Amino acid sequence: MPGRERSTAPARAGGDHTPQAEGDLEPLRLIERFLAQEAMLVDDRRRALAAATEAVGLLRARVGSAPSTRPVEPVAEELVAGVVSRLLHETTGMTRSFVMAVDEGPALDDSAMRDNRERIAAGLVQRAIYPVAVLGTPSGLRWVQSWGAIGEEQRVVAGATTEFAVFDSAAVVALARWGEMSSGYVMSRERVVVDAFAAYFDLAWDHALPVPTAVEDAEADRRLVELLGRGLKDEAIARYLGIGLRTVRRRVARLMAVHGVETRFQLGAAVERAGRRPPPGR
């Protein structure tokens, strides 16, 4: 590989060696830069987790000091959609929606959907996090694209572990039991509860991926390499990009051939050196 040839000059007397070529230091600098970036991400996550932990601690103290209060109230199944619609009308701040499934839940109610669309059309911010698996089904993809088309801010995660919606700082509606779609829903207007769910959402949002759109091949290749660098498996990358598993592996093999590398780690380093722009060579 260029920059990796060993010097053929004789060693100097006394055991001195010739200085390393500049190219020899490039992989080390790449690794050092990568580690520095990861350290910054770890620090950000620690701060976010600390904020969420503090919110949970406040919630525990609040419940423990006032056992007669009920910070979380169950909502009858037939009333959930109406509660959601009322909260959409009551609030003007950001709505945060953490979605576990798009084929069930109060969001499918016609009135709630209409109110939600009108709210977004009025310029109010709605953010939604979806599991990447929904992009792999025609109905799920249509759902995400339809809401994205009217202005919903969207990101995806490898897997959503529960479902809830935070309405500004006023209320949260969530599954009664974490991650169980059949458990029903509860609502809370307790500020400390709302803040805890908002902190969880914001932490997930910061580490989620944007919903992919149709892009040029060069941009798709750049995204593919970025996803490989994040440690995603081929199957997850295929679902995220909306392409077949064999297509992912074929693109990776082509990029490795174009850059003259033998491993995926080397591919990431090669693209980094090239300014993260895969060169032509199709």
Image (tube, grey):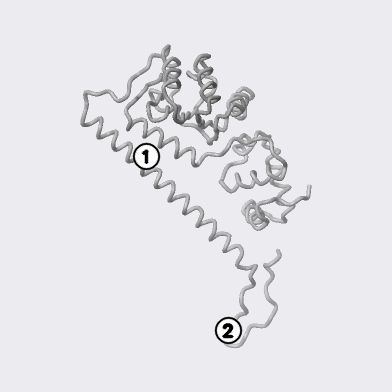
Instruction: Pinpoint residue 90: horizontal percent, then vertical percent.
Output: 41, 22
Question: On residue 184, which mark appears?
Answer: none
Instruction: Pinpoint residue 172: horizontal percent, then vertical percent.
Output: 39, 26
Pointer 2 residue: 15
**Local crowd size for mark 2, using a 10 Å CA cut-off: few (<14), some (14–19), many (≥20):** few
The answer to whether residue 51 is left or right of residue 280 is: left
Pointer 1 residue: 52
- The number of discs equals 2
Secondary structure beneath disc 2? helix
Quarter where residue 186 is shown:
top left
* In the foreground, 267 or 83: 83
Secondary structure beneath disc 1? helix
Residue situated furthest bottom in the rendering: 13
Instruction: Pinpoint residue 260: horizontal percent, then vertical percent.
Output: 72, 56
Name the kind of residue labelled 1 in the image.
Ala
The answer to whether residue 7 is left or right of residue 162 is: right
Q: Quadrant of the N terminus?
A: bottom right
Look at 61% across and 25% down and name the residue there. 146
